[in-house]
Amino acid sequence: MSLAGKSVMITGAASGIGAACAHKAAADGARLLLCDMDVERGEALRQELASKGADCYFHVCNVTAEEDIETAVRKANKYFGRLDCAVNNAGITGPAAAIESYRLEDWNQVIATNLTSVFLCVKHQLAAMKAQGSGAIVNVASGAGLIGTPNLVAYCASKHGVLGITKTAVAENPRSGVRINAVLPGSTRTPMLEQSMANPEVEKMILGSIPCGRLAEPEEIADAILWLCSDAAGYVNGQSLVVDNGGLSR
Ligand SMILES: NC(=O)c1ccc[n+]([C@@H]2O[C@H](COP(=O)([O-])OP(=O)(O)OC[C@H]3O[C@@H](n4cnc5c(N)ncnc54)[C@H](O)[C@@H]3O)[C@@H](O)[C@H]2O)c1
């Protein structure tokens, strides 16, 4: 399952699951374009990985802006000569509220960050990968992409939508040499989840909803994402891989 020498673009790379992907891919010898809007953490990660010998760049990037995504793909081509793999991972939860009181501006922000961003990434990554005749894209959705999620209507809708983008991209490109899959993590120990779990009621609800009794570690999600990026998954395309230790199997 080697990514040695492959060029990999990761959005939301500065934290949590994205950062775990960056650490593991770098250790495997991949060349990395780290994309995030958090300049401080993104640059710190780049420095850390570069100090361990990784060929690694940081691109400050708002995933809701098409020009930022276009520039990221162009930079990957400039630095590495090609874009082999992309992990479209940046996301936010948005505020919790029932549908009747969910604010339109919150809806718009979550949809732009979690869904429109994936559309923009796939649009520009596909064009580059089709031109070179190969590539692998992994979109990070969520278990909330398969089931209703009380008080998180925009998050839930955005993650259902990510699966629609993934399947459509595959249906449009059966002979392109580009594989597009989605990973659906269960509850994972990252700053995003820790922030939600600061509320003891939410913490109790989240921990109570995990049959195996523990959160996923970000590295466990990264393993699945990077496997889908690798040639070991060469015949796996259009799939929605749930990585939740059986949580949705009840
Ligand atoms: N943690 C979980 O339990 C969990 C479960 C299922 C799915 N996910 C999904 O995994 C992905 C990563 O989540 P995480 O838990 O690692 O979160 P995180 O908050 O630790 O990291 C998200 C990263 O995305 C970046 N980001 C946010 N908005 C951005 C924007 N507009 N432009 C550029 N970068 C932006 C943040 O700066 C941050 O570095 C998300 O798509 C999330 O929905 C997480």
Image (tube, rainbow, N blue to C red):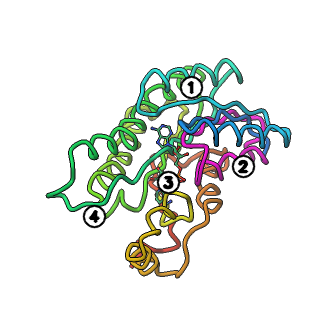
Q: Position of residue 186 (x, y in %)?
A: 48, 65
Q: Are marks 3 and 1 in contact (CB under 8 Å)?
A: no
Q: Mark 2 — residue?
A: 23
Q: Looking at the picture, which amino acid does disc 4 mark?
A: Gly
Q: Quadrant of residue 145?
A: bottom left
Label 3 to label 2: alpha-carbon separation: 18 Å
Marks counted in the figure total 4
Horizontal relation, residue 148 to residue 176: left or right = left
Q: Is residue 139 above or below residue 124?
A: below
Type of the residue with mark 2:
His
Q: Residue at x 14, y 58 (%)?
A: 100
Kindly tell me whether mark 4's CB lies below 8 Å from ligand 1. no
Secondary structure under tag 2 reads: helix
Question: Going from the N terminus, do you reach mark 1 or mark 2 first?
Answer: 2
Compared with residue 193, is residue 62 higher up or lower down, i.e. above or below? above
The residue wearing badge 4 is 148
**What kind of element bears circle 3?**
strand
Q: Residue at x 21, y 44 (%)?
A: 104
Magenta residues span: 1-27
**Alpha-carbon distance for marks 3 and 1?**
22 Å
- Residues marked 3 and 4 touching at CB (< 8 Å): no
Q: Mark 1 = which residue?
A: 72
Which residue is drawn at the image coordinates 68% and 33% (left, top)? Answer: 7
| Sequence order check, earlier mark of 3 and 2 | 2
Q: Circle 3 sits on which residue?
A: 183
Q: Earlier in the sequence, mark 3 or mark 1?
A: 1
Provide residue 34's location: percent of width, then percent of height.
Answer: 63, 36
Q: Which numbered disc flags the more N-terminal residue, 4 or 1?
A: 1
